[in-house]
Image (spheres, grey):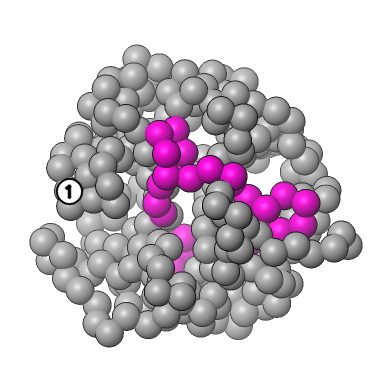
Amino acid sequence: MTEVRVPVGPDGAARPSGTPCWVSLMVHGLAATQEFYGALFGWEFRPGPRQLGPYVRALLDGREVAGIGQLPPDRHLPVAWTPYLTSDDADLTAELVRHCGGTVGVGPLDAAEAARLAIASDPSGAVFGVWQAQEHRGATVTDVPGAPAWHELLTRDAPVVAKFYRTVFGYEEEPAVSSGPDGLDHITLHIKGRPVAGIHGVGNALPRDRGPHWLTYFRVVDTDEAVSRVSDLGGRLLAPPHDTVHGRVATVADPEGAVFSLVHGVR
């Protein structure tokens, strides 16, 4: 196995274990998906590791922001953006996932020289990745227009699921679970005092066709304009643009149904 390296963020600082460091999407039509996101976010693409099939890395101004792979024709899996959380030891993290009631569906395995990774799900069924950096240390740019800005888990019972993630990744405890304006639970996961991801307990308000899942927010210059572009490119609007304390947000789906959010403003 290749020498392990500490994952670093865009500023060159080390990413502590549990920090979201990469996001990927597995689709049926790789070329069409590249066209969609290239037109929406200005991404360019170059080949990446192919252990799981054809795969490309998305570049924004020459810097890596995400990955897109192609599903085998006989695999009818949900098409969804998946965040990867850093780990100092992917094998140990996988064992912790199982011990805490989660499931490991893929790996841990080496993706060429890039990373040792696993794809897992928490006890509620929400899918996430585990990323132990080797040659590839994750996204080299975040929270700028065209790049991921935030990741939030939508689930039924936030406190129960938060305990799983705290145990597996060591997120810091919050003094209390705060109730947002919608009367539902909002928990922010911190590492070394810095917020890195959120958990939103929505009870029975989850879409009927989707269980608990992670939602990636991509930064845009203008949320309303980006929504219009999504529609022009064959995507769908799921939740119209609205103002929040974190900025103007909308939720959309790409032509294959992968759901993501668009946000303009300061988190």
Q: Position of residue 150 (x, y in %)?
A: 39, 51
Which residue corresponds to the image point at 62% horizontal and 30% vertical from the top-left? Answer: 62
Q: Residues within 10 Å of mark 1 (few under 14, many from 20)?
A: few
Which residue is more in the foreground, 7 or 46? Answer: 7
Looking at the image, the residue that sits furthest to the top is 232
Q: Image height check: is 235 above or below 220?
A: above
Quadrant of the snapshot with the N terminus: bottom right
Which residue corresponds to the image point at 52% horizontal and 63% vertical from the top-left? Answer: 19
Give the dominant element type of the magenta stretch: helix, strand or loop. loop
Q: 142 left or right of 246?
A: right
Q: Image height check: is 222 above or below 216?
A: above
Does the rendering let one see residue 60? yes
Q: Position of residue 146 (x, y in %)?
A: 44, 33
Q: 224 left or right of 216?
A: left
Helix, strand, or loop for circle 1? strand
Pointer 1 residue:
244
Q: Position of residue 21 (x, y in %)?
A: 56, 54
